[in-house]
Image (spheres, rainbow, N blue to C red):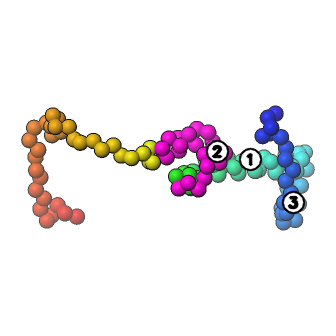
Amino acid sequence: MSASDDPRRVHFQSPEYLVDRLDAIAELFDKDRTDLLVEAIREYIEDTADSETFQELVATKYYDGQLEFETVKQLVGAETAQRLRILKTDLEDEPLDLAAPDDTDIYDGDATAVETTADDER
């Protein structure tokens, strides 16, 4: 068990009816209330992290400098965070100032012009 897997005590308040339902489910499955809460939290976090809306929000805040890379890694995982880091680096780079090559004819001969009529415009 790594240090990040060590249990941490968390206190929070919940409506009584939710705790009663949780206890009934725990008893039904012969499980501990804490085990059910941890499982529910884990599933919620995984579902949220996989959501496209969530990933877009994380990316936007990261690109805007509102989130640090390590936080992004915790939120969306190492692989997605690394992909966002690469894209952010690309976005921050200055575009290359390259002139079009003189020795290449991109049309490979004469360019053909197309005339449109009023019927073509929509």
**In the visual, does 93 lie left or right of 2?**
left
In whole angstroms, how far apart are the C-alphas of marks 1 and 3?
18 Å
The answer, for residue 5, to whether it is visible in the render is yes
Say what secondary structure mark 1 lies in: helix
The first of marks 2 and 3 along the sequence is: 3
* Quarter occupied by residue 80: top right
Q: Earlier in the sequence, mark 1 or mark 3?
A: 3
Q: In this rendering, which labeled residue sits more in front, label 2 or label 3?
A: 2
Quick check: 85 above or below 117?
above
Residue drawn at (33%, 43%), measured in percent from left and top? 96
The answer to whether 44 appears left or right of 86 in the picture is right
C-alpha distance separating marks 2 and 3? 34 Å
Q: Amino acid at mark 2?
A: Glu
Residue 3, percent from left and from top: 80, 38
Residue 48 at x, y percent in the picture: 64, 51
Q: Position of residue 52 (x, y in %)?
A: 55, 51
Q: Which residue is mark 2?
A: 70
Q: Is residue 117 magenta?
A: no
Tell me the chief SS of the magenta region: helix
Q: Which residues are magenta?
A: 64-89
Which residue occupies the foreground of this view, 120 or 115? 115
Instruction: Name the residue type under label 1.
Output: Arg
